[in-house]
Amino acid sequence: KQEVTQIPAALSVPEGENLVLNCSFTDSAIYNLQWFRQDPGKGLTSLLLIQSSQREQTSGRLNASLDKSSGRSTLYIAASQPGDSATYLCAVSDMNSNSGYALNFGKGTSLLVTP
Amino acid sequence: DGGITQSPKYLFRKEGQNVTLSCEQNLNHDAMYWYRQDPGQGLRLIYYSQIVNDFQKGDIAEGYSVSREKKESFPLTVTSAQKNPTAFYLCASSNGANVLTFGAGSRLTVL
């Protein structure tokens, strides 16, 4: 069964720093990998989707990379701001799953950006 | 605006009661999903539906039931058989292996 792991579980950085969140997965047969943001008590907001044939995606200050063969993805946040404080979740859509295109989620990285 | 609407946002249930959580989408997505989120845990799949009038169990379906009579709607019933139903419930939809769009969630508390 696909296992998705996110490291670190929590991270605190001062405003302005660049940072990297890590995600690893055990089965490289995936359709895609998605990064989400979740604010406390809210639903998930999609940040970036990387299809299995792609290496990276960029949106504004966010850049996500995918190394499917090694089962790893990183989310790079440039020039962090206090408004970036949230939990970031990584999820993969697994070709070997018997749940269609349903996503398997990591437990998330809780990010705090201090002024 | 297109999106997913979940209701109610907060729900309290007495032990032994069934409750139904509503999920409606106007994105014209074929697939819909229900996930459960507990503190410190990742999201876990309860049920999913890839097409109207068809749905499949996810990883933690015991104590839950769903229906998919319309493309736009995928209600989740939490039955009295669910032993630990207090959690945050999230509904999502997508077209194939594309971006998953989530609703704002429903928080269920058992009194």
Image (tube, grey):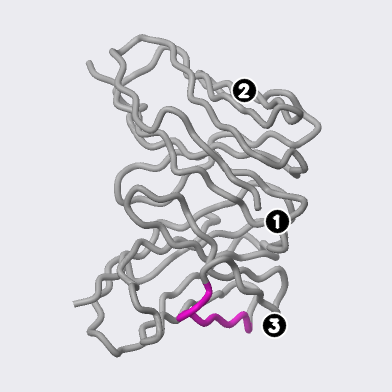
> Does the CB distance between marks 2 and 3 fall below 8 Å?
no
Amino acid carrying mark 2 in the image = Thr
Res A24 quadrant in image: top right
Could you classify mark 1 by the number of other residues whose Cα lies within 10 Å: few (under 14), some (14-19), or many (20 or more)?
A: many
* Magenta span: B61-69
Could you tell me which chain the residue with mark 3 belongs to?
Answer: B
The x and y percentages for residue A29 are 77, 43
Q: Which residue is mark 1?
A: A101
Q: Which mark is residue A58?
A: 2
Which residue extends farthest right?
A53
Main SS category, magenta section: loop
Q: Dot 3 lies on which element?
A: loop
Residue A106 lies, in percent from the top left, at: 51, 43
Q: Residue furthest left?
A: B111
Please tell me whether residue B68 belongs to the stretch shown in magenta.
Answer: yes
The first of marks 2 and 1 along the sequence is 2
| Residue drawn 49% across the image and 62% down it | B35
- Of tags 2 and 1, the one toward the viewer is 1
Q: Position of residue B74 (x, y in %)?
A: 55, 74
Are labels 2 and 1 assigned to the same chain?
yes
Q: Does B34 sit above or below residue B41?
A: below
Give the crowd class for mark 3: few <14, some 14-19, many >=20 residues within 10 Å.
Answer: few
Q: Give the alpha-carbon distance from disc 2 to disc 3, as whole Å.
A: 38 Å
Establish whether labels 1 and 3 are both on one chain.
no
